Image: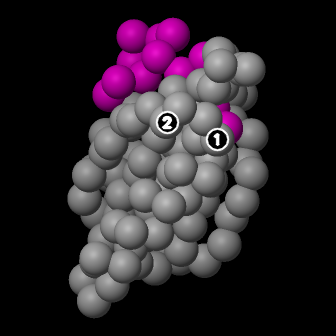
Amino acid sequence: MGVSLTLSKNDNGHFLSQVASTIKHTLLLQQYLFAVAATGSPSDFNASSLIICGSNESIVQRAALLAGSKFLGRVQVLQHDDKEWAASVRDIGTSNYDEEVRFDFLLWNF
């Protein structure tokens, strides 16, 4: 289980998908839940990309629901399949609680 916040030079969505794919491949035979996020792109300073991946659909759904409730009203889901959930989160880091939120939705689901 882990949380990582990173910054790419451009196209955060594609960059985070590559990072997530590499991590998933490494953890293929294990039970896992992880999230990768990147701050907003230069064209949209207020939105951040977030991807949650897990070894099964149930933990991904629970983590996504908790993330959505923690970032209430700021999440736009971009993709959701069995083992991956991707979203854009507006104004991440503007609340004093946002730092803790990234860990909450992982810790409460494992």
Please report the bounds of the magenta region as a residue range. 88-100
Task: Check if mark 2's residue and mark 1's residue have beta carbons within 8 Å.
Answer: yes
As displayed, is residue 73 above or below residue 63? above
Q: Which residue is mark 2?
A: 8
Q: Position of residue 49 (x, y in %)?
A: 59, 39
Element type at marker 2?
loop
Q: Which of the 4 quarters of the picture holds residue 28?
A: bottom left
Q: Nearer the viewer, residue 9 or 50?
A: 9
- Residue for point 68% across, 64% down: 80
Q: Amino acid at mark 2?
A: Ser
Q: Which residue is mark 1?
A: 11
- Residue for point 59% across, 41% down: 12
Q: Position of residue 10 (x, y in %)?
A: 61, 35
How crowded is the residue under tag 1: few (<14 C-alpha within 10 Å), some, or many (20+)? few
The quadrant of the picture occupied by the C terminus is bottom left
Q: Which of the 4 quarters of the picture holds residue 73?
A: top right
Q: Is residue 90 magenta?
A: yes
As displayed, is residue 22 above or below residue 92? below
As displayed, is residue 21 above or below residue 78? below
- Residue for point 37% across, 35% down: 5
How crowded is the residue under tag 2: few (<14 C-alpha within 10 Å), some, or many (20+)? some
Q: Position of residue 44 (x, y in %)?
A: 72, 20
Q: Is residue 9 magenta?
A: no
Q: Amino acid at mark 1?
A: Asp
Q: Nearer the viewer, residue 94 or 41?
A: 41
